[in-house]
Amino acid sequence: MSSLVMSSETKGASDYALRQAGPEDLAQARSVMLDTVYRDFGHGYLPRWHSDIIDLESFYLAPEDNALFVAVRDGRVVGTAGVRGQTPFSPPHPLEVARGFEEGRTASLYRVYVRPEHRRRGLAGGLVDACLGFIASRERYTGVYLHTDARTPGAVEFWSRRGEVLFDERTAVNDLREDAGEPFETVHFRLRIPR
């Protein structure tokens, strides 16, 4: 486990440490993630989409090219961000997204969450920078994918500063839907790998 130098976005947040997570961080990281899916997303834990939260070690610590990063203050994990070697596939992702990445050579970002009382301090940006630095250090990866829910305040703007929108389901999918179900709010991104 290694501590990371704070990025310029975390300036003013000197009482936080950003580091690659170890086994001792997993229970607190899981708490941040579960609190987020229940409180912020409103739907709670869904095994189909959130199984990595329960088994953080297998998804983030065990595979050599995967990682979990945490933001820590006063010995408590207050933010998370994960890297997994996972190429988006269709379904469930739109075919246009799946075609945009090289199979087996794509890193996906997951669980970029910060507890509400610690937001607006540059922690998410610092965690993402740590993830992108990790990805850049691996020969395996040629692309970085992530998706976000546009209902999360500031999410689309945050990710747009780090990459490009590949597919916006708010318009591309909802305009074609005939059912009256809840509209899709997912926006898919390709991020830049720092070189």
Image (cartoon, rainbow, N blue to C red):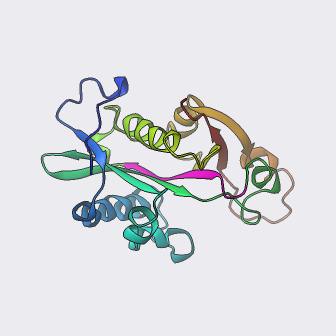
Q: Residue at x 34, y 61 (%)?
A: 35
x, y percentage for residue 138?
52, 46
In screen coordinates, is 14 left or right of 87? left
x, y percentage for residue 187?
66, 46
Query: Is 154 covered by the magenta stretch?
Result: no
Q: What secondary structure do most residues of the magenta stretch adopt?
A: strand
Report the front residue among 41 and 130: 130
Query: Is 108 covered by the magenta stretch?
Result: yes
Q: Residue at x 58, y 48 (%)?
A: 148
Q: How many marks?
A: 0
Q: Residue at x 38, y 60 (%)?
A: 33
In screen coordinates, is 65 left or right of 172? left
- Going by the picture, which residue comes out furthest to the bottom? 47
**Range of magenta residues:** 103-113
Q: Residue at x 33, y 65 (%)?
A: 30
Q: Is residue 27 above or below residue 36?
A: below
Image-quadrant location for residue 191? top right
In screen coordinates, is 137 left or right of 8? right
Image-quadrant location for residue 18? top left
- Going by the picture, which residue comes out furthest to the left? 74
Which quadrant holds the C terminus? top right
Image-quadrant location for residue 98? bottom right
x, y percentage for residue 74?
12, 46
Q: Is residue 105 above or below residue 54?
A: above
Q: Is residue 29 above or below residue 118?
A: below
x, y percentage for residue 184?
69, 55
Q: Is residue 56 above or below residue 74?
A: below
Report the front residue among 62 and 21: 62
In screen coordinates, is 82 left or right of 72? right
